[in-house]
Amino acid sequence: MLTGIRERTVVKENGMIEIPATDLAVGTEVEVIVLVEEEEMDTTEYLLSNEANRQHLEEALEESKHPENFIRFDVDELENLRKK
């Protein structure tokens, strides 16, 4: 029979990981699997993460300075067109 113990801990100096296992008898053979939760990159960080994305973002910011290039539409009108 397999029993699972789930603990969250922090890696200490020299890569040491401590897992309290008070439910286990001394000498019990166990298998330890370490899952590392990666930090998610926020949207801005992602957009600036490579040259192509950075250039695209800079171009979009520059275009936003020219409202005469904006395309305006009425959501209700679009909904009516969709229903036809």
Image (cartoon, grey):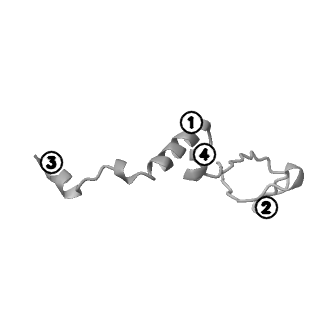
> Residue sitting at 72 percent across and 47 percent down?
34
Q: Which residue is mark 4?
A: 48
> Residue sitting at 56 percent across and 40 percent down?
55
Q: Label 3 sits on what residue type?
A: Leu
Mark 3 to mark 2: distance in Å?
Answer: 63 Å
Mark 1 to mark 2: distance in Å?
Answer: 47 Å
Q: Earlier in the sequence, mark 3 or mark 2?
A: 2
| Crowdedness near tag 2: few (<14), some (14–19) or many (≥20) residues, C-alpha within 10 Å | few
Mark 3 to mark 1: distance in Å?
Answer: 36 Å
Report the side of 78 relative to 71 (left or right).
left
Q: Are marks 1 and 2 in contact (CB under 8 Å)?
A: no
Q: Position of residue 49 (x, y in %)?
A: 62, 43
| Crowdedness near tag 3: few (<14), some (14–19) or many (≥20) residues, C-alpha within 10 Å | few
| Crowdedness near tag 1: few (<14), some (14–19) or many (≥20) residues, C-alpha within 10 Å | few
Mark 4 to mark 2: distance in Å?
Answer: 41 Å
Secondary structure at badge 3 equals helix
Q: Which residue is mark 1?
A: 52
| Crowdedness near tag 4: few (<14), some (14–19) or many (≥20) residues, C-alpha within 10 Å | some
> Residue sitting at 74 percent across and 45 percent down?
31
Report the side of 70 relative to 41 (left or right).
left
**Relative to 21, is 14 above or below?**
above
Name, please, the residue furthest toward the bottom: 22
Q: Are marks 4 and 3 in contact (CB under 8 Å)?
A: no
Report the side of 10 relative to 36 (left or right).
right
> Residue sitting at 51 percent across and 41 percent down?
56
Mark 4 to mark 1: distance in Å?
Answer: 9 Å
